[in-house]
Each structure stands twice: as structure tokens, then as C-alpha cells.
Amino acid sequence: MTRSVRRTRPMLKVTGAGAAALLALSACSSSDSDSGRTSDSSASDKLSGEVTVFAAASLKESFTTLGKEFEKEHPGTKVTFSFGGSDALAASITGGAPADVFASASPKTMKIVTDAGGAAGTPATFVRNQLQIATLPGNPDKIASLKDLTKSDLKVVLCDRTVPCGAAAEKAIEAGKLKLTPVSYEEDVKSALNKVVLKEADAAVVYKTDVKAAGDKVEGVEFPESADAVNDYPITVLKESQNSDAAKAFIALVQSAEGQKVLSEAGFLQP
């Protein structure tokens, strides 16, 4: 791992001939002084080593794309991802798992890390996500609302209540004053969606981004109660990061216009 080092020079107060000499010296060493004025740019050019990113399962497609772009922009770097339920990722981080960046699907799960002193700074919300019902292709059960999922003949899957997609689904169900008994609770949103993809369930309440990522393997149904359960996604550099410069640069890419375009195209909402 190579860390960038910023060099600073003491400020000199000169006048007259001394100023002229200094100008001449500056001209001769313009490349060096330019490096000093654009330290952030030159530092990013020197990034190297591995960046380990723990991210919510719903970010898999978008972050994989951004990881490849990051490696392309910074030769010598490698982005390694661990995707899963935000609660499990937070527990791993507080348990000492080595990571540089944490991107959670809710402030509540991020708080597990911040309360344990695991964040290097204040987490920033970079996107938001909304729920949608994933049905079998063609929606053969004619599911048109969240209430339809309460039908006893339907096999419905939800995310576990401890993960953000499950907590959001529970909030939406409460907003609709409904009682829904799923056939199973899954460990993360991808696992819930996969039950429908494999035709082991008739429907699942997941994120709109996951429905979009699945393409024609499922069909999405919007429902008004989802507006009461929109999740903010915070991201932070971790305090124990072994490559904080690269970690900060990856987060900068996520928050950049380029990164936001990738996330928006995946169906995420602007923060």
C-alpha cells in the first residue's frame, strides 16, 4: 500500500529583487509548484492498494459498476466488495472485520457503527430507495396493491425485520393498517427477490432498484404505502481503514455526478 504524502513549503515574504528571483525559481520548478497547488489531484493519481467496501445488498449492481470505473481511473487500485444485509455488515464491522468503507441502506444500521466509534467522520446520505412489490413475470396473480399480498393463497416473502428492507416493509404495512404473514423472512433484499425469481414465492416486497436489476425475471408493482417507508442510504470511511485516501476517493466517486448517474439509472432516488 502506498499512501500519498502532501508536501508543504514554508511561506516566504520577499520584495524587490528577491521577488524577481523567486518568480524565476518558480518558473523553473513549475511542475513541482503545480503539484503543490493541485495536491488533491496529484494525490488521487498516486492512489494504490486495495479498498474494501461493505455495502448493502441493494447496491450490488451499481457499486460493482463504480468499482470497475474506480480501478480504471486509478491504476494500481483494487476494490473488493462485501454485499449483504446492512445489519450483518454493521455487526461484522463492530466485531473487527477489516473494511475501509461502509454504505448502509438505513441510518439505523449506520448508527450501529457510529455508536461504536467505527466511523472516521460523519456519514453522508448519498441516495434514497423506495419499495416495490416483485411478482412473477406477467403478474399472473394480478397483484395490484399491498393489500393483495394478504390473500391466504399467495406465497409472500419479506426481508427480515432487522435489515432495512424488512424494516421499511413493516413500516409500509403498518401505514396501510394491514396484517401480512409471509412464508419466510430473508436475510437481505437479494435473497427475498431470489425467491420470486426461482418461483418459490409469488411475490416479495423489495426495493425498486432490485426489481429493475432483475429485468424480465420479475415484474414490479408500485404501491402508495411505499412513500411512507423511503430509506436514506448513508456512507462513510471507517476509522480502522488501512487505505483511507483511496476510501475517500471511492466515496467521492459515489457522490460525483458520474456516480449519481449510475445510481439514478439503477432506480435510486436523489438524496
Image (spheres, rainbow, N blue to C red):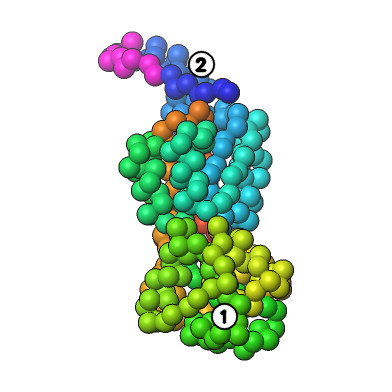
Q: Secondary structure at mark 2?
A: helix
Residue at mark 2: 28
Q: Is residue 133 magenta?
A: no
Asked whether, in this view, residue 137 is left or right of residue 121, the answer is right
Specify start and end residues of the magenta stretch as a single range.
8-18
Residue 13 visible at all = yes
| Secondary structure mainly formed by the magenta segment | loop
Q: CA distance from mark 2 to mark 1?
A: 65 Å
**Relative to 262, residue 82 above or below:** above
* The image quarter in which residue 2 lies: top right
Q: Nearer the viewer, residue 62 or 211?
A: 211
Residue at mark 1: 221
In the rendered image, residue 133, in percent from the top left (x then y), is placed at 56, 76
Quadrant holding the C terminus: bottom left
Name the residue type under label 2.
Cys
Which residue: 45% across, 14% down?
25
Q: Is residue 10 magenta?
A: yes
Quadrant holding the N terminus: top right
Crowding near the residue tagged with mark 1, few <14, some 14–19, many ≥20 C-alpha atoms within 10 Å: many
* The image quarter in which residue 13 lies: top left
Name the residue type under label 1.
Val
In the rendered image, residue 43, in percent from the top left (x then y), is placed at 51, 29
Give the number of the mark in front: 2 or 1: 1
